[in-house]
Amino acid sequence: MFSFGDSKKRSDNFSHIERQLDFDENDLETVQTKALYQWWRSYQPNLPARADFDIVEHRSLPPYIYVMEVLSPTKFLYRLNGEHVVRLVGRSLATHTLSIDSPIYEDKIFASYLSDLITHRKACRCFGDFSLLGREHIKFESVDCPVADKEGNITHIIGVLTDRYGDGGR
């Protein structure tokens, strides 16, 4: 497990994030994170391709989905984020590019994490707290799943982000 940056430097809604590369499906607390992880795990020991993910087969997930395209091992493009993701994060990041060289602290930290996912070639469970504009803390959970092309290169990371005790609950 590793921590995700200094919360005092952050300008987004995340106040604390922990990440687990080695986790069991039973560790996942929401139906959305379990659904995406079960789909991803069904391809093991291989990685699924981006084309293998058909949103029609996952009708409950669109509000919670985000898709990151890998432009290089250290640069990423936010291709898509569902409305629940936008609500939790505080803004839409669709079409936003981020890299480890970004001047924006959150982008730099997130790009570094995504680079680590490419290296490890594993799904990762994330959990922590949001601090939404003076409202009480909300617990969240996400799972990030790398997908690859036919040559085995990771081309995208598909994830879901849910609040653990609200819309995304059990």
Image: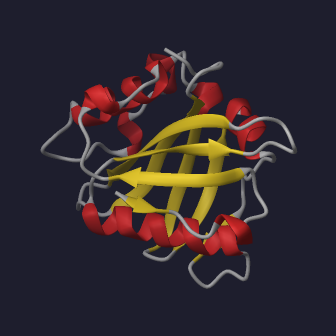
x and y, in percent, of residue 65 in the image:
57, 35
Query: Residue drawn at (73%, 75%), measured in percent from left and top?
Result: 104
Q: Position of residue 12 (x, y in %)?
A: 76, 57
Residue 6 image position (x, y, % from top left)? 62, 70
Residue farthest toward the right in the current orientation of the protein: 134
Say above or below: 8 vs 152. below
**Colour scheme employed for the rendering of this structure:** secondary structure
Give the residue drawn at x 32%, y 31%: 27
Report the residue that reaches farthest toward the left. 45
Residue toward you, 135 or 51: 135
Going by the image, does 29 lie left or right of 6? Answer: left
Residue at far front of view: 136
Looking at the picture, how far across and down is residue 66, in whole percent? 58, 42
From this view, report whether residue 99 is shown above or below residue 153.
below
The answer to which quarter of the image holds residue 89 is: top right
Residue 87 found in image quarter:
top right
Q: Nearer the viewer, residue 55 or 115?
A: 115
Name the residue located 43 percent from the left edge and 75 percent from the top edge.
73
Figure check: 144 above or below 72: above
Which residue is rendered at x = 51% and y = 37% of the image? 141
Q: How many marks?
A: 0
Point out the image quarter for the N terminus: bottom left
Taking 98 as reference, is 89 left or right?
A: right
